[in-house]
Image (cartoon, coloured by chain):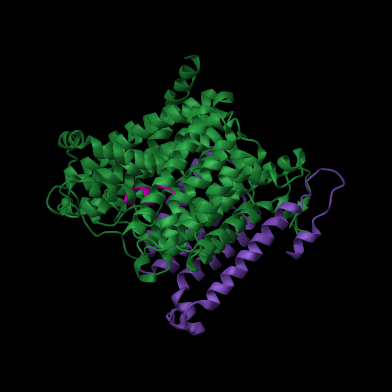
Chain colours: A green, B purple
Amino acid sequence: MDIFLEALLNIIDPVTLIYMVVGVGAGLMAGSIPGFTIAMAIVLTLPFTFSMPPAQGLATMISVLVGGLSGGLMSGILTGIPGTPSSVATTFDGFPMARAGEPGLALGIGVWSSFCGGIISAILLVLFAPQLAMVGLEFQPWDFFMLVMFALTVTASLAGEHLVKGLIAGAAGLLIRTVGEDDAVGVGRFDFGSDYLLTGFDFIAVLIGLFAFSQLLSDLRNPVTARNALSDRKQVKVKIEHRRAIGILLKNWVVVIRSALIGMFTGILPGAGGSIANILSYDQAKKAAKDDSKFGKGDPRGIIAPEASNNAVEGGALTPLMALGIPGDITAAIMLGALLMHDIVPGPTFIKDEPVLAYSIYIAFFLASFIMIGMQSGVLRVFVLVTRIKTYVLATVILTFATIGVFALHNSIEDIWTLFFFGILGFVMRQFGFPLAPMILGVVLGNIAELNLARALAIDADPMLFFVRPWSLFFAIVAVFSMIFPIYQKHRNTGSLLERLFSPLVLFSLSLPLFMMGGLLRTALAVAAIAISSTILWRRFGSQSKA
Amino acid sequence: MLASFEIREPDYGVLSPAAWPRLIIIILGVLSVIYLLQSIRMPKEAKDAAPRKSIGEFILYWRNVIAVFSIFALYLIVLPYLGMLIGNILFSFILLTVLGGWRAILMHLLVALGASGGMWLLFTYVLEVFLPRGSLTGL
């Protein structure tokens, strides 16, 4: 209880509260502007939080995150252009509803769904993270190494259409991280005799360059659209209809909870984030509806599903971060960067060792959702003003800000050069269709992977241990299947052998490490996995031979 | 790949510092070969879909991007002399004018002064970060 109070005092501190309000506001704005992603907003917040104490800095970043996730719905509903990839599905029904004369109701439903999604996932985060950390305590260096590999492969296979490009990006990210003195013995690597390279790239400068700089350049590429404003609307007179929206939400509480759970699960999975969750839960809401004829024409459930799920994603993404030190998506990876910046290395013992900080994160998450609700109406007015600013002006101001922010990290102009180089790299990669997410994960997790590899081989030089230890084998198997997944997806509905074998094969192979782990629950799980996969196999092949 | 052989072998430690980078490079190499083979095997129509551009068209198409990169590089070169306050104001003003044209030049000046100046004040006096002063300007 003392810990809880201490954490609460950390967050209730007036300065922190001001930062959080500013953070939510900034997040809402960034989220509402198409072309400015949440990840970009958070990565640009990092330099600000550098001089703050860890709890305050994290609270600020969480506020930006929560604001950003809810900000996307404003432009999605009012202009039909999603503010972020996480709210693409919101436009399907939000925009038609707004056009039909109910923009206030559409916004209200969106805002309150966001709120519910955030709160549900925050509760699940508080419940699950310590449990997952308990499991994480079993992890040895081998297992951690494989977990990182799994995080990279699954991100690579989900991030883009092209698996090989994703894997190349991930490997390149790992390689970028090795430049400079190595952590264990301090030997220079890839320094080519230059002092600049010997110190290594500051990875926050790398992140800002790869993500923010390259994004701004893509926004500016077309000289005509760069000079346009987002919308030429002079004024929007909308009052968010809170009471009616809450009524509709209460009536559709099943959709709210289902979507939040989908979001939460997608978030926990490394690599999959809000951009997948919102479409997935929209799809599910549509499938589950008895009468889906109104979907696409302004069905309230079509707004509830994506908005509840995209806010729930972050609770999910923070769970493996707090429990294992492995981020669930890019935004969580940047949060990991913020923790590392303050010399806090999260791992299975994080919640036990730093309970105050862990509770501060929980509380900030809850509080930010409430601040978001409170600020939504006010920001709506500013949003209309911001959409009238021309793209190039906004981009220039943000770029200028990025230079100051990157400099402030270490008081070094060299970091701005890093920003510049990786801005070019990120832009070129974007143009050639290489996904950036695996690369960023590679840069953030590179050290962790190497450290655990070194530790594992120091304990026992036998590399076979990576495939014999249960958890390590478990992650190796899911990593392999995550790489096959894109091929499976291509063959879907073709009735090919791969399609019919995929899911039973996954279950069969996963039962092996589960058996190896022993214990009552896991053996039972393994038996269940075999039983389910046998039934699927029997249904798909057994019934066929009869017919 | 070659560079990984320049990493000094320490006499102590268990995992050589070169092992990890080399492992990544091998994986990266294999992946690149796969990627190359895939691109070669790609059907011909898909390749022809992107029309070839002359250098002039290329520059015209990417002119904003090229402008941002060159101005940014220039800014980085003069930054140690001008300092961050003046450097950033000039940088944002020039960039705005190049991207937005001459017509709104007054607005560009105001935005440059307001945004760069404001951020400079914020960082110097609120966050207490010392931003670089120029060796020529002293600011």
**Where A305 falls versus B19 (above or below)?**
above
**Where A33 falls versus A25 (above or below)?**
below
Whether residue A18 sits left or right of residue A511 in the image: it is: left
Residue A223 painted magenta: no
The magenta region covers A271-279
Is A334 or A480 nearer to us in this picture?
A480
Q: Position of residue B62 (x, y in %)?
A: 47, 73
Residue A272 painted magenta: yes
**Where A258 falls versus A162 (above or below)?**
above
Is A322 or A193 nearer to us in this picture?
A322
Whether residue A430 sits left or right of residue A87 in the image: it is: right
Determine the residue positioned at 43% across, 31% down: A125
Residue A183 occupies quadrant: top right
**Where A272 falls versus A495 (above or below)?**
above
Q: Position of residue A22 (x, y in %)?
A: 39, 37
- Magenta-drawn stretch, dominant element (helix, strand or loop): helix
Residue that extends furthest to the left in the rendered view of this protein: A101
Residue A268 visible in the picture: no
Residue that extends furthest to the front in the rendered view of this protein: A546
